[in-house]
Image (cartoon, grey):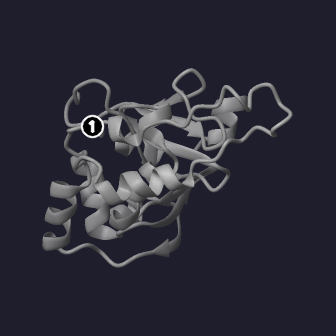
């Protein structure tokens, strides 16, 4: 795959991943949460409502021990991108990509609490304006691909997510901005 020909602009190319690093990612990104990960998520939860707000008493923290991470394979085209650049920032037309590195793929999914708000969705990049690109892994792959959704980090949920592509390559070759697709 000639990734230089796919993206019009390369703002930041990262070093490629070795086959050993790729194998490690493929075998570990979707492991169940560790006790340490669960504890970190529990410790950062705070009641967002002021004491005077009636919702303060109704707030219930969630239990990340109940989260499930999709037991699925990453699309081959994404693996090929990592072989070219382990993360990085690129664009086509008005569409911007800030791809997560292999170290960030799982950590960003957990940091934004995707298993709580969008179970089965796996974010792999952002657009620079707070929108996540995420695979919808609630169903099986079709021809080694999952549908791709965009959702805003401040309002995660399937009800507000918008389909943007049926494949990773379609997403990467697209030129229309996420904001235009979401808001017209």
Q: Is residue 59 above or below residue 122?
A: above
Residue 47 seen in the figure: yes
Q: Residue furthest top?
A: 159
Residue 6 seen in the figure: no
Task: Give the percent coordinates (x, y) of residue 87.
Answer: 41, 66
Q: Nearer the viewer, residue 63 or 120?
A: 63
Q: Is residue 4 above or below residue 168?
A: below
- Residue at (14%, 70%) from the top-left corner? 19
Tell me: 25 left or right of 160. left
Q: Nearer the viewer, residue 49 or 150?
A: 49
Task: Give the percent coordinates (x, y) of residue 16.
Answer: 29, 74
State the SS at label 1.
loop
Task: Give the percent coordinates (x, y) of residue 166.
Answer: 38, 31
- Could you say which quadrant of the image residue 144 lies in? top left
Q: Which residue is mark 1?
A: 70
For the N terminus, give its image quadrant: bottom left
């Amino acid at each position: 795959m000639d990734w230089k020909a796919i993206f019009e602009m390369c703002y930041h190319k990262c070093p490629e991943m070795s086959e050993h690093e790729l194998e490690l990612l493929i075998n570990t990104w979707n492991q169940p949460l560790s006790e340490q990960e669960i504890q970190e998520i529990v410790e950062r939860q705070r009641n967002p409502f002021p004491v005077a707000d009636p919702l303060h008493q109704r707030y219930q923290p969630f239990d990340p021990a109940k989260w499930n991470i999709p037991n699925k394979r990453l699309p081959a085209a994404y693996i090929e991108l990592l072989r070219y650049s382990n993360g990085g920032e690129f664009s086509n037309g008005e569409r911007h990509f800030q791809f997560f590195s292999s170290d960030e793929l799982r950590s960003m999914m957990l940091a934004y609490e995707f298993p709580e708000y969008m179970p089965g969705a796996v974010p792999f990049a952002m657009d620079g304006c707070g929108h996540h690109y995420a695979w919808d892994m609630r169903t099986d792959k079709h021809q080694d691909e999952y549908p791709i959704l965009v959702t805003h980090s401040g309002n995660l949920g399937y009800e507000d997510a918008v389909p943007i592509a049926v494949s990773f390559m379609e997403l990467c070759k697209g030129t229309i901005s996420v904001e235009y697709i979401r808001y017209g």
